[in-house]
Image (cartoon, helix red, strand yellow):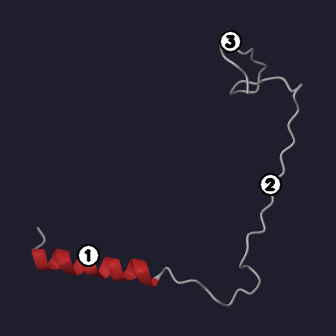
Amino acid sequence: MLTNTTRLLLFVAGFIISFTNCQKESNDPGTTEARLVLKFKFDSTQARLNNIGQPQAVPAGNAGQ
């Protein structure tokens, strides 16, 4: 069983290691803004599919989105 001083030492060492690895690299020019563009195209006539890709009817009382 670990003593209290050993537990404290392990905690402090883990704390220091975890925060020294989280440094931002400044050698990467031009990546200061997001460049991800998501474009969605929805088809209102598309058949509704279930989880295995088979056509599925919307149950009565449930509204489709």
Pointer 3: what residue?
59
Of labels 3 and 1, the one closer to you: 3
Q: Amino acid at mark 2?
A: Leu
Q: Amino acid at mark 1?
A: Phe
Q: Toward the viewer: 62 or 11? A: 62
Q: Residues within 10 Å of mark 3 (few under 14, many from 20)?
A: few
Residue where numbered disc 1 is placed: 11
Name which residue lies at 57% across and 83% down. Answer: 24
- Quick one: SS at disc 2? loop
Coordinates of residue 8 in the picture (x, y in percent): 19, 77
Q: Which one is closest to the eye, mark 2 or mark 1?
A: 2
Q: Residue at left 73%, top 79%?
A: 31
* Disc marking residue 26: none
Left or right: 21 with respect to 11? right
Instruction: Measuring from the top left, give residue 3's x and y in whole percent.
Output: 10, 74
Q: Considering only vertical position in the picture, is 29 above or below 48? A: below
Among the two numbered marks 2 and 1 on one chain, the one whose residue lies closer to the N terminus: 1
> Which of the pair 46/14 is nearer the observer?
46
| For marks 3 and 1 on the same chain, the one whose residue lies earlier in the sequence | 1
Q: CA distance from mark 2 to mark 3?
A: 31 Å
Residue closest to the far top: 60
Mark 3: which amino acid? Answer: Pro
- Marks 2/1: CA–CA distance: 42 Å
Indicate the secondary structure of the residue bearing disc 3: loop
Q: Earlier in the sequence, mark 2 or mark 3?
A: 2
The residue located at (27%, 80%) in the rendering is 12
Residue 32: x and y in percent read 71, 79
Q: Which residue position is annotated with label 2?
A: 38
